[in-house]
Each structure stands twice: as C-alpha cells, then as structure tokens.
Image (cartoon, grey):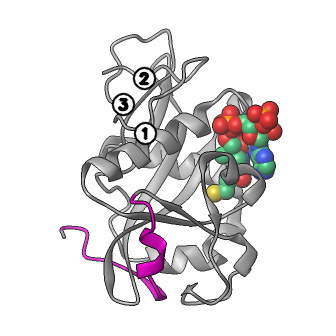
Amino acid sequence: MTAKTTGVAVPENQDTIGCPQASNACVRPAEQKDLATIVELHRRAFGPGRFALTAYRVREGTPPISRFCRIAELDGRLIAAVRMTLIEIGGSKGALLLGPLAVEPAHVNQGHGRALISAAIAAAREQGLALVVLVGNASYYGRFGFAPVPAGQITFPGPVDPARTLAFEIVPGALASFHGVIRAADPGA
Ligand SMILES: CC(C)(COP(=O)(O)OP(=O)(O)OC[C@H]1O[C@@H](n2cnc3c(N)ncnc32)[C@H](O)[C@@H]1OP(=O)(O)O)[C@@H](O)C(=O)NCCC(=O)NCCS
C-alpha cells in the first residue's frame, strides 16, 4: 500500500509500505541503501553533539536498520527517517526505542514526522510489540499518544531528563509491566 504523507492521514492500525508514485511523498521500510542518506540527514538535523546523547548509548552496536525503521521519500529522494531499535526494559522484551526522528528542514511541518511515527507503530503492532519508548519533546510526541513515564520506572544507561522519557502503549496497560534499565535487545528476537 502507498502512504502519501502530504495531506493524507495514515491509519494507525495499518503499516504503510510502497512508493509507486514518484510525485508524492510516501513511506516505506528503510533499507541498507538508504543508510548514507539517513546519516547525512542526522548530521544536518542534530549536529555533532548527537553521539553524546544517552539514547545513542542504547543503540550503539545495534544494526542501524531494523525491520521497524521507516523512511519518507518525495520524488524519489529521502526526506525523513525514523529509527526503531528493539529493546529490553529490565530484561523484559516487547518494546522498541523510537529515534532519531528527523525530517529535512525544507520539509518540516508537512506531516512527514507524523506519517513515519504512525507507520513505525503500525509495523510494531503487526509484529506483536507492546510498548514504544523515546526521549523527546512531550509537546510534539504527546499528540500521537506518547505520555511521560513515571519518574524512575524506566531508566537509561546514562543521564536523561525524566520529563522527556515518553512511552506509547501499543497494548493498552503495557507500560505497567516494564520496569528497569533499557538495553538493546537481540534484533533477531
Ligand atoms: C521534530 C520533527 C521530527 C517534526 O517532524 P515534522 O514532519 O516537521 O512534524 P509534523 O508535520 O509531523 O507535525 C507538525 C506539528 O508539530 C509541531 N512541532 C514540530 N517540531 C516540534 C518540536 N520540536 N516541539 C514541539 N512541536 C513541534 C509543529 O509546530 C506542528 O504543529 P501543528 O500541527 O500544531 O501546526 C522535525 O521538525 C525535525 O526533524 N526536527 C529536527 C530534528 C528533531 O528535533 N527531531 C526530534 C527529536 S528525535
């Protein structure tokens, strides 16, 4: 299915794959061939300080592209990307870490971030995941249903502002069964 990200709502319970129409933005799974462009997008969106962020520590050593990562393309050019990393929380599986999410500066505020989040969550739901966690701005992610995690319930292997630790329950009530430190999970699991 094609997912046009411009002016089209993406159903929350549906993955959104395929790009047959080059004239409109669409969402598809990220592939190895996208990696260099994604790295360049991150460099422009976040700058060199990005590697010092605690969330990078969780992702360190994991494959840069998982089956949950999504990109948006416009006229065949990658304009936005979201990385999703399988994690364990206090040893419990079934969760993903969302981020980085980045949109080309020339294309912000056109719904691409929303479309990528929606598609990535849909993929996670299809594959039986229960929870998505991220470190980010509640004033942005709150609109998608992400809410602050109670302080201390879920922690990172490094300093993170607790007010920026947000979670989205794919399975209602799932957050209650996750406590402890986030670590990368086996991506094959
Ligand atoms: C933040 C970002 C991912 C949003 O993606 P986007 O495609 O521009 O956003 P969307 O079109 O989905 O949503 C637009 C809405 O989000 C709001 N918004 C955008 N960035 C925001 C931010 N950092 N904080 C709060 N709200 C934000 C816009 O004002 C707009 O609000 P409106 O719908 O009420 O007008 C994108 O601007 C970006 O890549 N920024 C630089 C990198 C970054 O900060 N990434 C997020 C941390 S992982």
Of pointers 3 and 2, the one earlier in the residue sequence: 2
Q: Position of residue 7 (x, y in %)?
A: 61, 17
Q: Quadrant of residue 164?
A: bottom right
- Up-down: is 97 above or below 105? below
From the viewer's perspective, tell me whether residue 128 is left or right of residue 45.
Answer: left
Q: Find numbered disc 2 in the image and state the secondary structure of the residue it sits on.
A: loop
Give the residue type that dot 3 points to. Answer: Thr
Q: Find numbered disc 3 in the image and state the secondary structure of the residue it sits on.
A: loop
Q: Which residue is mark 3?
A: 16
Q: CA distance from mark 2 to mark 1?
A: 9 Å
- Up-down: is 112 above or below 183? above
Range of residues picked out in magenta:
171-188
Of pointers 2 and 1, the one earlier in the residue sequence: 2
Observer-nearest of 50 and 158: 158
Would you say the residues marked 3 and 2 are in contact, meaning their CB atoms lie under 8 Å apart?
Answer: yes
Q: Which residue is mark 1?
A: 119
Q: CA distance from mark 3 to mark 2?
A: 5 Å
- Up-down: is 97 above or below 19? below
Q: Position of residue 174 (x, y in %)?
A: 42, 69
Give the residue type that dot 2 points to. Answer: Ala
Q: Residue at x 32, y 65 (%)?
A: 63
